[in-house]
Amino acid sequence: MLAHRLHGIPPTIFSEMSALAMRTGAINLGQGFPDVDGPPSVIARAVKALRSGHNQYAPGIGVPALRQAIARHQQRHYGLDLDPDSEVVVTTGATEGIAAALLGLVDPGDEVVVLEPYYDSYVAMIQMAGGVRRPITLRAPEFRLDVDALRAAVTARTRLMLVNTPHNPTGTVLTRAELQAIADVAIEHDLVVITDEVYEHLVYDEHAHVPLATLPGMFERTLTLSSAGKSYSFTGWKVGWATGPAELVGAVLAAKQWLTFTSGSPLQPAIAHALDAEAEFPRRLAAELAGRRDLLCTGLREVGMEVREPEGTYFATADISALGWPDGMAFCLALPARAGVVAIPSQAFHDDVEAGRHLVRFAFCKEPALIEQGLARLASGDLTA
Ligand code: PMP
Ligand code: GLN
């Protein structure tokens, strides 16, 4: 029954693994969602909006107050000047931003150069748009950009590049030099770049997030996606946005109007409030997450995994080779019974399955007590194959 455009795309690993956690009562360190909500003042603002008549369709492009707050955010953090009426569009999470951008910009047969391991909706949406993905693999243990591979992946059919930094699942934050290499290729081949920056504020230590759109010659060819889900711990609200030159934002809007038409009204003024009045929240969140990252990584090392210290995001990638499993999928399927914990096999995010076979992703956007409990379970379980 299924249309060709969905053939070969498995159900999302996040639903599969969260269902496994529910079924088994395991601690869910798989799907990335915080166990504590974002700022109470933002919730209060949403309640106020619900009670004061913000319950009918918002404008398709998004409510003006939110678009203006997004423009101010881009100016405050990155010095980018955006016209909120033509260079900002509100989306139903970054997920709709990804979908609308690919449907709006990719023609059948167009090639999309994309970093793998992928956030899984990229694969589905490139295929649904009729595009062909050309993966550039970030390889363990360092997960850096291979610039030669990037150059080799570009052909006459390449339409655009899809970049994600800070990168889910590896935790890599692309350096300015890596971004400059992407920019050089984009400019040389006249490519559009879609950049998924939903973890823009969740970076640690000396690592800094550099938006691709701030590099010379890049604003005019870059569509930047972000979301309040990660920065404000409201993943269930699904409020995201796309910013960039009017032509690229217009392509998103052209597709978005037929996907959702408009995004939920009452949450938009609340996220406008978050961006302006709770501007410090993401920084505090990142400071808390840095400690949880250390807690998780130390604990995973103690149970025999090699762990790459994430530079950003709220995920850590662990190498389970020493535990003797044939692959991360077998390990993750066994983990609830072995230790009462759920994690995500990174191979689900790869075309080059070999590159991800031995890797497993753990989320640390959880209360320290829960992370400690998960680690205690891993320490007392039998993790060897
Ligand atoms: N991109 C990446 C890299 C993500 O990790 C997520 C979170 N699931 C999204 C996009 C989707 O964001 P949203 O929940 O706002 O749709
Ligand atoms: N971004 C989160 C993750 O990577 C949630 C993904 C999802 O539920 N689609 O785990």
Image (cartoon, rainbow, N blue to C red):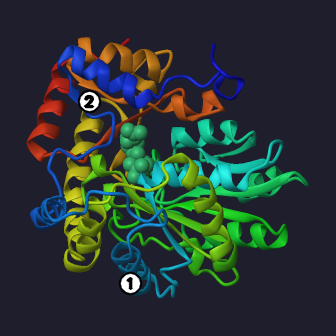
Amino acid type for the residue under numbered disc 2 = Val
Number of marks present in the image shown = 2
Give the residue at mark 2: 303
Q: Quadrant of residue 340?
A: top left
Q: Position of residue 72 (x, y in %)?
A: 38, 84
The quadrant in which the N terminus is found is top right
- The reply to whether callout 1 and callout 2 are in contact (CB within 8 Å) is no
Amino acid type for the residue under numbered disc 1 = Arg
Residue at the location (33% across, 36% down)? Answer: 31
**Vertically, is 88 above or below 255?**
below
Front of the two marks 1 and 2: 1
- Please tell me which of labels 1 and 2 falls first in the chain: 1
Q: Is residue 317 visible?
A: no
Q: Quadrant of residue 15?
A: top left
Residue 72, label in figure: 1
Residue at the location (26% across, 51% down)? Answer: 293
**Vertically, is 335 above or below 274?**
above
**Image-based side of 189 in relation to 74, left or right:** right
Residue at the location (64% across, 70% down)? Answer: 222
Residue closer to the observer: 21 or 337:
21
Q: Is residue 101 visible?
A: yes
Ligand 2 occupies quarter: top left
Q: Position of residue 143 (x, y in %)?
A: 55, 50
Q: Is mark 2 within 8 Å of ligand 2?
A: no
Q: Position of residue 369 (x, y in %)?
A: 8, 41
The quadrant in which the C terminus is found is top left
**Mark 1 and mark 2: Cα distance apart in space:** 45 Å
